[in-house]
Image (spheres, rainbow, N blue to C red):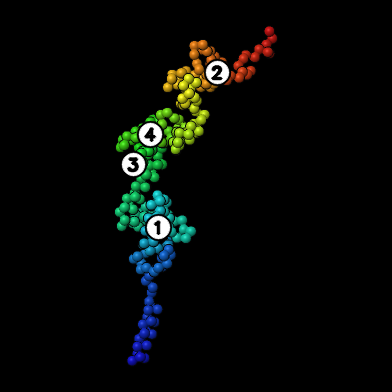
Amino acid sequence: MTTIDNQFIENTDFQCEGEEKNTLECSICMDDFEYINMYYVDNCDHSFCNDCMFNHCKGLINENDLNIKCPGSKCKNPLNYYDIKFIIQNDTGLDEKYEKFLLENQLRSLDDIMWCQNALCSKPIPFIPGVYEIECKSCLTKMCTRCKSALHVDYTCDEFKLIKDCDSFEEWRNKMDTKLKSCPGCKHLVHKISGCNRVICVCCKTHFCWLCNEKYSSENDDHFDVPRNCVNTYVPNASDYNDDSDSDE
């Protein structure tokens, strides 16, 4: 009986060794899987288990990295749209996120689309080139199309970029130093946005020169009667005068 049993075992082992292997090894998790549980990447013949392929795509999609390639070592073969849709088809939430990111990335490549700056909205907004102020139709947030940020009526785009992250008045004042002057009448800070060098303090209505900070009145009405700047900051040079030194007269 023992001899028969041993012979049966030996024959069985021999038959198993002769059978064709019907599993493949996933090169990511290194486990063996039946063919039906493996995913084959077109054009490069790499194969991975379905779970590893799903996790590979899921991680990249969650990071909004949609340039998804074969996870094979040093392989740069891209997965196409239908590959990815097939791999993630059983996760509705991930599939919706993938489609959302695809649309957003495409819209970001367009010059006449910007995104609402309201963090609770963030909807795409089309605008006409040359129109610099737009309003989100969903949340009514107003924005500047020049720098694609919140509307900043009292600041240029460069100034707004400089100060928008300021946490205190002192930080704002330091960054805006060259754009601020103390009114010679009431000493309040005055911020000049644009225009000529004769400015008016909004607090006390004092007229003064932005260049030298001198009060402007009818008594010094000739304050700006020089080729450049004002009488206190003017430095004459030869170009201000007609050079007649070479005249024959």
Name the residue that disc number 4 marks.
Answer: 143
Report the Cα–Cα distance between label 1 and label 2. 68 Å
Comparing labels 1 and 4, the label whose residue is closer to the camera: 4
Amino acid found under the numbered disc labelled 1: His
Amino acid found under the numbered disc labelled 3: Leu
Place of residue 43 in the rendered image (x, y in percent of width and height, measured from the top left): 42, 58
Place of residue 105 in the rendered image (x, y in percent of width and height, measured from the top left): 39, 45
Circle nearer the N terminus (3, 4): 3
- The residue that appears at 36% across and 67% down in the rendered structure is 35
Circle nearer the N terminus (1, 4): 1
Name the residue that disc number 3 marks.
Answer: 120
- The residue that appears at 37% across and 88% down in the rendered structure is 6
Name the residue that disc number 2 marks.
Answer: 230
Report the Cα–Cα distance between label 3 and label 4. 15 Å
- Compared with 145, 218 (above or below) is above
Q: Is residue 52 visible?
A: yes
- Compared with 208, 13 (above or below) is below
Name the residue that disc number 1 marks.
Answer: 56
